[in-house]
Image (cartoon, grey):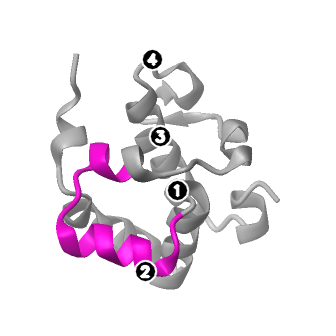
Amino acid sequence: MTHKILAVPFADVYPLYVQKAQRKGRTEAEVREIIRWLTGFSEQDLEQHITAGSSFQELFDAATLHPSAALIGGSVCGVKVQEVPDPTMRKVRMLDKLIDELAKGKAMEKILRG
């Protein structure tokens, strides 16, 4: 089963991540740092994916997940991240979880699993 979100352009969801963080007093720079940490992208790589309209599938196909990403656990929308069967969908949920932690006020060094 292919999840609809995987075909959605990352650029369509990115502003929502930023808004969620900013509503809680966090910054776009912190959102970008989290995305770069998770995906292994440089700032230029990230900007290119946003500008090119890469889908979530394309974004994560091009990513090299951080070795500590395996430590990301917990639930997003009632679904345990580590139990999501589709590997790309699991990566999307990992990103969602990291943004949730940012919005909840967690320190960056804890979010990035030091």
Residue 112 relative to residue 21: left or right: right
- In percent of width and height, residue 75 lies at 54, 33
- Which label sits on residue 85? 4
Which comes before the other along the chain, label 2 or label 1?
1
Which comes before the other along the chain, label 3 or label 2?
2
Residue pictured at 48% horizontal, 79% vertical: 43
Which comes before the other along the chain, label 1 or label 3?
1
Disc 1 crowd, CA 10 A, few/some/many (<14, 14-19, 20+): many
**Residue labelled with disc 2:** 44
Q: Amino acid at mark 4?
A: Pro
* Segment colored magenta: 41-59
Q: Amino acid at mark 2?
A: Gln
- Which label sits on residue 66? none
* Residue contact between numbered discs 3 and 2, judged by CB atoms under 8 Å: no
Answer with the quarter of the image where residue 80 lies: top right
**Residue labelled with disc 3:** 91
Q: CA distance from mark 1 to mark 3?
A: 9 Å
Q: CA distance from mark 2 to mark 4?
A: 31 Å
Badge 2 element: helix
Which comes before the other along the chain, label 2 or label 4?
2
Disc 2 crowd, CA 10 A, few/some/many (<14, 14-19, 20+): few
Q: Amino acid at mark 3?
A: Lys
**Residue labelled with disc 1:** 39
Disc 4 crowd, CA 10 A, few/some/many (<14, 14-19, 20+): few
